[in-house]
Amino acid sequence: MWVTFIITLSLLITITMTASAMLGGYIGRRFVPIQERPNYVGKALETRITRRLRINEREKQTWFGYAKDFLTLNLLFLLIGYVLLRFQGVLPFNPNGAVNLDWHLAFHTVISFMTNTDQQHYSGEALSHLSQMFVLSTLMFVAPTMALTMALAFIRAILGKQIGQFYFDFVRVIVYVLLPISLFFGMFLIAFGVPQTLSPNAVVTTLEGASQTIQRGPIASFEVIKQLGNNGGGYYAVNGAHPFENPSKWTNYIHLFLMLLLPMSLPFIYGSMAKKRKQGFLYFGVMLFLFVIGTVAMYATLYSNPSLHGQEMRFGAIGTALYGAVTTAAETGAVNAMHDSLPSLSGIILMGNMMLNVVFGGVGAGFMNLMMYVIITIFVAAFLIGQTPTVLGKKIEGREMKLVALTLLVSPLLILGFTALALVVQPGQDAITNAGPHGISQILYEYTSAVANNGSGFEGLLDATPFWNITAGFAMFFGRYIPLLLMVAMAGSLQMKPRVTDDGALRTDTPLFTSLLFGVIVTVGALTFLPVLLLGPFAEWLMIR
Amino acid sequence: MSSIKQAGIVVSLTMILCGVAYPLALTVAGQALFPSQAEGSLIERDGEQIGSKWIAQPFVSEGYFHGRPTAVDQLTGQSGGDNMAESNPDRPKHDPELAGAIETSGSGLDPHISIEHAMSQVDRISDARSMATAEVEGVIQDTAEGESYVNVLMMNLALDELN
């Protein structure tokens, strides 16, 4: 079993890494500032469209202008999405008679899909076709695009290049990256048995003569962008465990590949845009190392505990372990087994991946978190050797370090703060369905998943209440926007600075620096979250062994 | 152009492109190339639809293979697990001889059972159908195609073919 696991993991990493390196190079070439961009198919059409939108890509946008456009578009999507969900009962395209969502459920759902989290507190049939198309499906493209544009702006800024035009990046990410890949792999999913139909549910007569409803719909188109964009929301309540979302081990591998593709490509995008391929590769290496440790540990927990409770036969222990590790590493949030029922110790890996949020991490967000740790490491290392800390020839000073420190504090404050709150108030405690330490884990998992914009859950938690909709809604909102904006502000601040000579400056593309970076990530992550992980999954393990 | 108007144009374009055009394009292509899968891999017998290859249906009679325990009513098409943690006292203990036979599945609609689980039902089925046990075991082997799990509906269809 271990041999099969190691071969499977190596193949998954090799294939996805190769594809990610190619995709990263492609994105890197396509998204350099216009002056550096060669001619390509579609450039003329693109120019015509942007002229109509009155966007001039040669016009210099500051990081502040870029962030302003980013926020305007986010707020508009949030507002329209909220209104559509709140009033879907009286709006058209509602053949199954879905009713208006309560205000707190509409609030939670629209934030959930806008922030790339896709935590679901509504039940599957609660949405109209209009809500499915214009809120869920649309936002599943919009959310990863938003994070990717911010990551592109961030990379350009720290490289001292022009930051670009937000709307231009936004449209190009959807048209050149997300749509083509989705269409291509959507066909694969259909071929392997994922339905894609506009027909109503089928009603069949079973072999024993009963009448069974087969719920179906346009699932493949939903499934592929859900994984590629690290969204993770399920078409059905049980997500990727449902045989129509994930009918075989082959579709399981396609899911794993798609979840990792974009997060893995970010270091290569950086390497390509910065023309520092070695550096990109080393950043990739740090994340890969963290990923391999977590994934091997995940398989070990399932290997030593062969219970199939909450798991599907067709994936086996390997397919289940890989899915759990990948979905939390890449912050997708899809599941192919009920995480609540997995071995107690696996909770440490699942939550640990989300707490670190740099084990590849979500599209764009994971890479920006890594760069936050890079700057902390430079800061620490430079002082150890008595130098002024610089990154890419720019001095790191008080202002940048304040922004970095703030970013670092956001996620522990939100996760631990909300968990503590839910543990002491009645509406929080009432949601627990597994008594003892696992009850703490259920609450901790919910907020960790919300803040890291993952979206998976210990789904036993009874979270369809105003308390959970409101607190998880805020956790997702702040967990998303505060770090993104702080990091782009930090990059903007670096961009304005004069370049100092980097003769004799600390080199960041060495194995020594890379291992120091790894140490900083693990130390900072472990010191922050270890105590609460001991109270939850570890205490549960001690209790039952 | 005001920034709100600019954002409004981008919002409507995105909704039409990603919310309508993309799923429609994939539906047209999928229905053209893989019509059976795209419709849900429905199985017909004597001109009547009897189920989907991928969705478990409840079996209770002695002469059919039974599927895994489930937390949902499979006839409604709803999905769900029972979300019992490892430490939950109500959760049944694992039996390695009967992998998956006493544990609820993740989806509640798992169409497969383990080979061991299937073999444990051979005597009951051969009694009920007055078939040789070797014939029932043959159905398991043929349907499993070398995997460690086997599709319950496909086995039961094969049983009905035989007698």
Image (spheres, coloured by chain):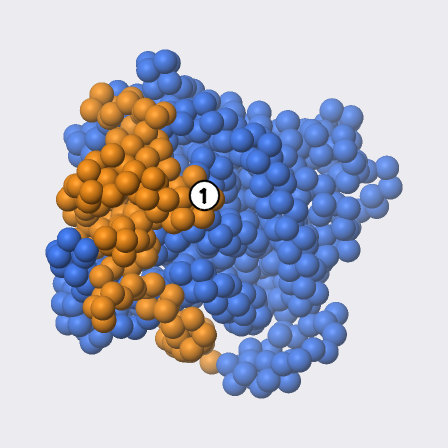
Chain colours: A blue, B orange
Q: In this rendered view, identify the residue nearer to me: A337 or A427.
A: A337
The residue located at (55%, 80%) in the rendering is A50
Q: Secondary structure at mark 1?
A: loop
Q: Quadrant of residue B112?
A: top left
Determine if residue A219 is in view.
yes
| Three-letter amino acid code of the residue under disc 1 | Glu
Mark 1: few/some/many CA within 10 Å (<14, 14-19, 20+): few
The residue located at (25%, 65%) in the rendering is B45
B96 lies above or below A315: above
Determine if residue A238 is in view.
no
Chain letter of disc 1 in the image:
B
Tell whether A48 sits left or right of A397. left
Count every numbered label the image shows and give the total. Answer: 1
Tell whether A241 sits left or right of A50. left
Q: Position of residue B87 (x, y in %)?
A: 29, 22
Rendered-image quadrant of the C terminus of chain A: top left
Tell whether B127 sits left or right of B144. left
Q: Position of residue A481 (x, y in %)?
A: 44, 50
Q: Position of residue A502 (x, y in %)?
A: 83, 43
The residue located at (64%, 63%) in the rendering is A27
Q: Position of residue A84 (x, y in %)?
A: 25, 67
A345 lies above or below A496: above
Q: In this rendered view, identify the residue nearer to me: B38 or A389.
A: B38
Q: In this rendered view, identify the residue nearer to me: A298 or A71.
A: A298
Please name the residue that numbered disc 1 is placed on.
Answer: B147
Q: In this rendered view, identify the residue nearer to me: A197 or A205.
A: A205
